[in-house]
Structure formats: structure tokens, C-alpha cells
Amino acid sequence: MNSQNDRVYSAAERKSNVDPRRLIRERQHFSRGIMVSVGVSKMGKTRLVFVEPGAKIKSEYYCNNLLERNLLPNIRGKCGRHNWILQEDGAPSHTSAANTVAFLKNQEVQFIEPKAWPPNSPDINPVDYAV
């Protein structure tokens, strides 16, 4: 029998018919995914911020956990008093006017508002590796 990536040599027609004690090892076929956030600029990059497994990235989570606690302090530490402007991508948590835009204004962060973003700008986003 030859499953796609696991090979079981047996007279059984299906892997499920093989006594599990006879199998050498079982493994997951796909690794668990992780999500990270990072800032990149000519001044350098921020440290990676790992999103909690299973977290739903809504605007509140994005503002409180990623921006306020991690990315903004790291960006400010990297850039010092240099002028910098935050540009995000079109993720729903980035475009929320009621939460994210208001949060950034309250934090006095210079940023490009979603309505001013070009409609398709892969060449101006250095970390968007869409394949």
C-alpha cells in the first residue's frame, strides 16, 4: 500500500486495517501554522511578535496586543526621534476606522490612512510575499 507520503508495506489493502502497534510512527501531515507581525523600514526591523495560537485578529486584538504592547514601542525604540510613518496592509484589523484608525490617531502615530492606500501595491510592501 502506498499512501501519498507515508508508505506502509503490508498485505492489508488499507492502512486503517494494519494493527497500529505494527506501524513505526505516525506523524501529522502538516505543521501547525503560526502568525507573526513585524515592522520593516530603512532604519531596520522590529522584533517578531508572535500571535497567540487560535487568536482572532480583530481590531481590538491588533491595537492592544500587537501595536500598543509590541510594535509601537519597538518602532519608537528603533527610530528614536526620527520621523516615521506607519503603513499597513489591507487586513480588516488594519482598516477599521472605528478602532485602529482612532487608536493610531490617539497614539499620535503618523500613518497612511486606508483611504489613501493605492489599490494594488505589492512593490511598496516589502513584507507581503504573496505567491
Image (tube, helix red, strand yellow):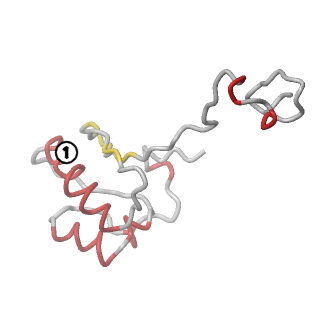
71 to 26, vertically: above or below? below
Counting from the top left corner in percent of width and height, residue 34 is at 45, 44
Task: Reply above or below: 33 against 21.
Answer: below
Answer with the quarter of the image where residue 5 lies. top right
- Residue 94 is drawn in which quadrant? bottom left
- Label 1 crowd bin: few (<14), some (14–19), many (20+), radius 10 Å: some
How many marks do you count on the picture? 1
Q: From what the image shows, is residue 88 above or below residue 127?
A: below
The foreground one among 22 and 60 is: 22
Residue 40, how many percent across, how many down? 32, 43
Report the amino acid beneath label 1: Asn
Percent of width and height locating residue 24: 67, 21
Left or right: where does residue 118 sit relative to residue 9? left
For residue 64, above or below residue 9: below
Q: Quadrant of the C terminus?
A: top right
The residue identified by callout 1 is 74
Which residue occupies the extreme left position in the image?
81
Task: Name the residue at 37% across, 58% down.
Answer: 88
Q: Which residue: 29% across, 69% down?
A: 100
Residue 102 lies left or right of residue 128; in this view the side is: left
Q: Extreme bottom residue here?
A: 98
In which quadrant of the rendered image does the N terminus lie?
top right
Q: Residue at x 77, y 24 (%)?
A: 7
Q: Is residue 95 left or right of residue 10?
A: left
The residue positioned 24% from the left and 74% from the top of the image is 102
Horizontal and vertical percent for residue 78?
Answer: 17, 40
Disc 1, SS: helix
18 vs 81, left or right, is right
